[in-house]
């Protein structure tokens, strides 16, 4: 038997069988920090920026939600999940940076850490796409898992 969960005894890739796991409420919260720079942030009013492509934060939140729902199509060993809820918050945290928080909730047999991380990333990538006509000096600086609950263990990374 393989010591790796995603390899079968022959060493070939496999998806983990979760059929014996209990259904529990599971949540994950991911955070992304993004450098926009003053040139972009100065265009924001009432915490939104309208570009030729439309409202930046609203569009990015919708894209992030879509990313959460498509995670299993992007990451080969992720199970397709029936997501109960996604909440994405985008806020400017200083004169050059913003923060994205993506919380995903499910009642299922497997966690939603990858879904939360994907949602935060796709939100940032959409902001980049919608603001690149103003400046291309943007940097997605950090994406990390803040919290995971449910399943075998809980994690709090702060």
Image (cartoon, rainbow, N blue to C red):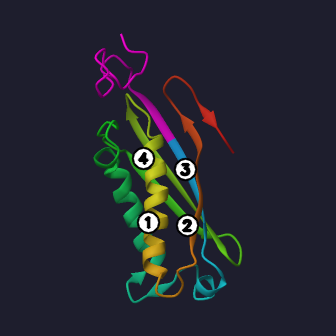
Q: Position of residue 64 (x, y in %)?
A: 41, 60
User: What predominant SS class does the magenta segment belong to?
Assistant: loop
Q: Nearer the viewer, mark 2 or mark 4?
A: 4
Residue under label 2: 90
| Frontmost residue, 76 versus 126 | 76
What is the distance, in whole Å, between disc 2 and disc 4 at their CAs? Answer: 17 Å
Residue under label 4: 115
What is the quadrant of the N terminus in the image? top left
Q: Which residues are magenta?
A: 1-27
Q: Quadrant of residue 142?
A: bottom right
Callout 3: 10 Å neighbours few (<14), some, many (20+)?
many
Residue under label 3: 30
Callout 1: 10 Å neighbours few (<14), some, many (20+)?
many
Residue at screen point 30% across, 41% down: 82
Q: Is residue 143 left or right of residue 93?
A: left
Q: Quadrant of residue 84?
A: top left
Secondary structure at badge 1 equals helix
Q: Quadrant of residue 2?
A: top left
What is the distance, in whole Å, between disc 4 and disc 1 at their CAs? Answer: 14 Å
Q: Which mark is residue 61?
A: 1
């Amino acid at each position: 038997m393989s010591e790796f969960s995603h390899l079968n005894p022959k060493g070939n890739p496999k998806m983990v069988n979760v059929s014996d796991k209990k259904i529990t409420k599971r949540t994950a919260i991911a955070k992304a920090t993004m450098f926009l720079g003053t040139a972009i942030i100065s265009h924001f009013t009432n915490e939104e920026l309208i570009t030729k492509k439309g409202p930046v934060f609203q569009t990015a939140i919708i894209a992030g939600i879509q990313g959460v729902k498509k995670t299993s199509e992007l990451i080969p060993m992720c199970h397709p999940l029936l997501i109960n809820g996604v909440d994405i918050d985008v806020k400017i945290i200083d004169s050059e940076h913003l923060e994205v928080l993506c919380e995903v909730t499910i009642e299922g047999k497997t966690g939603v850490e990858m879904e939360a991380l994907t949602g935060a990333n796709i939100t940032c990538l959409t902001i980049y796409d919608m603001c690149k006509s103003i400046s291309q000096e943007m940097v997605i600086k950090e994406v990390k898992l803040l919290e995971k609950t449910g399943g075998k263990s809980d994690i709090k990374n702060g």
